[in-house]
Image: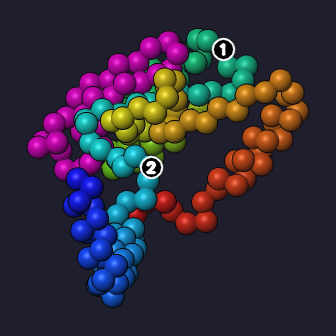
Amino acid sequence: MHRAYDRSLRWSLAHRPIIFSIFVASFFASYGLFQIMQQDFLPSDDAGLLHGSVQTAVGTSFDQYLAYSRQAADIVEKDPYVSDVQSDESGELNIALKPLAVRKLSADQIAAELRAKLRGIPGTSITIVNQPIIRVGARGSRSNYQYTLKGIDLKELEDAASAWCAGCKPTRPLSA
């Protein structure tokens, strides 16, 4: 093993222009791949499942909250690409899509379509996400990623969260 390394090192030092050319080619190939590949942390995948969450204004009665949740589930269930919807009292929606061979749209496209349909329910904020196959962290959330700040000073946490959120706003879309 040591002898093979010694030989390859001697050859590399004797052929520096070739090694430098390989380095330059690798650099430009990496740059080219970076330009064409998705730039999301975990690229979206179509597993045929979407997750939704119904939120309402503070002070909404529980009965009204249930009515909003039922209305959202009814709208989702009527979508032609949805095969089943499970909802609960907490406003969570688990949405099973029809098989990919039967539908014309991807899970991301269906999620966007459902979000547009659900915008019409006044008094609610409803999120529909196509969660990545690989879950990062143990908590469920209304988005693909969730960040948690911890501390004992509430004012300092609020200031740090506001600054962090302002810095996270993209100047251009992350994925094409």
For label 2, the residue is 41
Camera-nearest residue between 9 and 174? 9
Camera-side residue of 105 and 8:
8
Crowd tier of the residue under label 2, counting other residues whose Cα lies within 10 Å: few below 14, some 14–19, many 20 or above: few
Where is residue 113 shown, x and y percent of the image?
A: 38, 47
Distance in Å between CA atoms under marks 1 and 2: 38 Å
Give how far across and how far down residue 95 sits, in percent: 33, 28
Q: Does the magenta stretch include residue 100?
A: yes
The secondary element bearing badge 2 is classed as loop
Q: Which of 133 and 120 is in front in this view?
A: 133
Q: Quadrant of the C terminus?
A: bottom left
* Mark 1 lies on residue: 61
Q: Residue at x 78, y 27 (%)?
A: 151
Is 107 positioned to the left or the right of 153 in the image?
Answer: left
**110 with respect to 139 (left or right):** left
> Is 153 positioned to the left or the right of 101 in the image?
right
